[in-house]
Image: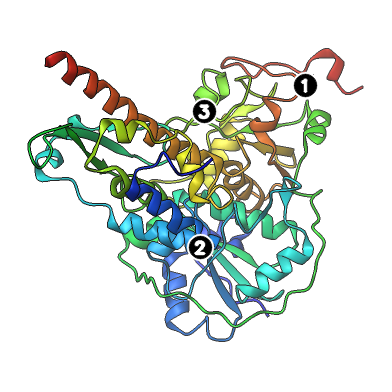
């Protein structure tokens, strides 16, 4: 039985209001003892591997994108049995409602949510505004470690195809909409890494030909919450030129910022087919015989790659 | 790589990290982040005296100062000062390691620290390559500043 869905005016206008909860909702649920029976589990997922330890929402467990969700040997996400073991150890069962939050307007939280979705976890939601909003509102934090009762999680094979694109999928996709969520400097090729972040070794700067530039942060308001449906429509349907029903691929540098955009397109605007290309610029920028476009223009699909 | 070129305090920290399992290493790094001293008042009021290490994923500022040895003779020693936000515990933690390991040493001792010393902490799996590079850059910046200060003090004498 999933946990009741939050009802409010802002969320109601989204395509899938059940994918978000507000800080008020979560605080009330926690005060009501929601964590006691394992039906609801709160997960913190941050960029900084130690941030959770400095203080977290009482009862929240930590999942680290780098150490918990990646398989360093296969350069892939963990497999079904590793995910089942991870989830169970965090008190998560297959029917648990999972609420994820994190730093930086939920970049890594959205990324973790996307990985949960690769495993078909049904009820996984984002805390709108994430860690920063919770703290800004002066809500409770603790450094007490959470000791959840072990959950029961079946081994489910990952189903990548519906929401994950690989390089070859993107090559085959050329001609259909792509959203590049990196900074304008990364898009034009002026730089190959995020402002204030170190050089990460992409050989070429630029973007995937035809991709529209919509930096991820445009989907977030000042307080880190998602913008309203009208604002998101103005951004993605208006400025970026997407049309209802489009098949869309989003990418960034390693797939974390684009998870934030993937969430907006998929659950807030209701695009059926949205895939996150997690190889992103780190792969594309270095790949052999793969075309790029430089400058502010979107560019066009090279003739030999135009689908017949 | 061995730890023989490391100053004693830093070598001890490296040994402490290496004796632990990965989760405990992270816990130790967290303790270093808590132990990083605040800036003295004179630097707090003058942020322009600190330099940002842009390779770090979180804002990290540092500077060095040289002073006479406690007995007033021999080589000058170097003091290290760091500023990093509380919400960047990994960055703070590494600054804490460098502070405890290098503060108050001579230029020769600091310059002898191998550039890849951060890798000795055994955190390369738990911490992303990007962050490891930030740590290496922090050490590099300190060494460059110490080398420059040493050259200046030599020409002055």
Q: Secondary structure at mark 1?
A: loop
Q: Are marks 1 and 2 in contact (CB under 8 Å)?
A: no
Which residue position holds label 3? A199
In this rendering, position of residue A152 left or right of residue A100: right
Q: Chain of mark 1?
A: A
N-term-proximal mark, 1 vs 3:
3
In this rendering, position of residue A305 left or right of residue A187: right
The one nearer the camera, A267 or B79, is: B79
In this rendering, position of residue A302 left or right of residue B146: right
Give the percent coordinates (x, y) of residue A294: 62, 15
Residue B20 is marked as 2
Residue under disc 1 on the same chain as residue under disc 3: yes
Residue under disc 1 on the same chain as residue under disc 2: no
The one nearer the camera, A25 or A39, is: A39
Q: Let me know if residue A130 appears in the view.
A: no
- Residue at 60 percent across and 81 percent down: it is A38
Give the percent coordinates (x, y) of residue B81: 23, 41
Q: Measured along the vertical axis of the image, is residue B126 above or below residue A291?
A: below
What is the distance, in whole Å, between disc 3 and disc 2 at their CAs? 31 Å
Which residue position holds label 1? A288
- Residue at 34 percent across and 56 percent down: it is B32
What is the distance, in whole Å, between disc 1 and disc 2 at their CAs? 42 Å
**Which is in the foreground here, disc 3 or disc 2?**
2
Q: Secondary structure at mark 3?
A: loop
Give the percent coordinates (x, y) of residue A196: 42, 32
What is the distance, in whole Å, between disc 1 and disc 3 at their CAs? 20 Å
């Amino acid at each position: 039985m999933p946990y009741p869905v939050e009802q409010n005016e802002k969320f109601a206008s989204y395509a899938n209001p059940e994918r978000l909860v507000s800080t008020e909702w979560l605080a009330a649920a926690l005060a009501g003892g929601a964590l006691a029976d394992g039906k609801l589990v709160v997960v913190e997922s941050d960029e900084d591997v130690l941030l959770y330890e400095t203080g977290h929402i009482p009862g929240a467990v930590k999942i680290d994108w780098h150490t918990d969700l990646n398989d360093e040997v296969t350069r892939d996400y963990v497999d079904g049995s590793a995910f089942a073991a991870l989830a169970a150890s965090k008190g998560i069962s297959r029917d648990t409602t999972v609420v994820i939050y994190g730093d930086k307007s939920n970049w890594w939280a959205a990324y973790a949510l996307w990985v949960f979705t690769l495993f078909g976890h049904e009820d996984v939601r984002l805390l709108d505004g994430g860690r920063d909003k919770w703290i800004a509102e002066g809500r409770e934090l603790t450094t007490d470690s959470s000791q959840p009762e072990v959950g029961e999680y079946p081994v489910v094979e990952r189903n990548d195809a519906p929401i994950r694109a690989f390089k070859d999928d993107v090559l085959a996709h050329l001609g259909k909409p792509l959203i590049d969520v990196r900074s304008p400097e990364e898009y034009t090729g002026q730089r190959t890494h995020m402002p204030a972040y170190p050089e990460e070794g992409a050989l070429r700067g630029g973007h995937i030909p035809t991709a529209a530039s919509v930096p991820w942060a445009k989907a977030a308001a000042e307080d880190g919450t998602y913008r309203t449906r009208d604002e998101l429509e103005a951004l993605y349907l208006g400025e970026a030129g997407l049309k209802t029903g489009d098949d869309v691929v989003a990418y960034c540098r390693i797939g974390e910022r684009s998870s934030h955009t993937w969430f907006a397109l998929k659950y807030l605007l209701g695009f059926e087919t949205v895939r996150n290309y997690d190889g992103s610029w780190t792969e594309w920028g270095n790949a052999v015989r793969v075309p790029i476009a430089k400058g502010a223009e979107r560019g066009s699909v090279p003739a030999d790659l135009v689908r017949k | 790589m061995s730890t023989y070129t490391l100053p004693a305090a830093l070598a001890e920290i490296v040994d402490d990290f290496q004796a632990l399992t990965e989760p405990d290493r992270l816990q130790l790094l967290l303790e270093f982040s808590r132990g990083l001293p605040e800036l003295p008042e004179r630097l707090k009021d003058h942020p322009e005296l600190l330099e940002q290490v842009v390779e770090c994923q979180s804002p990290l500022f540092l500077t060095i100062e040289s002073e006479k040895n406690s007995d007033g003779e021999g080589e000058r020693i170097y003091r290290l000062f760091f500023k990093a936000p509380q919400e960047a515990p990994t960055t703070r933690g590494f600054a804490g390691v460098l502070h405890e390991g290098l503060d108050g040493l001579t230029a020769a001792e600091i310059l002898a620290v191998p550039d890849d010393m951060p890798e000795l902490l055994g955190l390369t799996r738990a911490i992303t390559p990007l962050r490891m590079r930030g740590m290496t850059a922090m050490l590099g910046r300190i060494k460059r500043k110490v080398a420059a200060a040493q050259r200046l003090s030599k020409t002055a004498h």
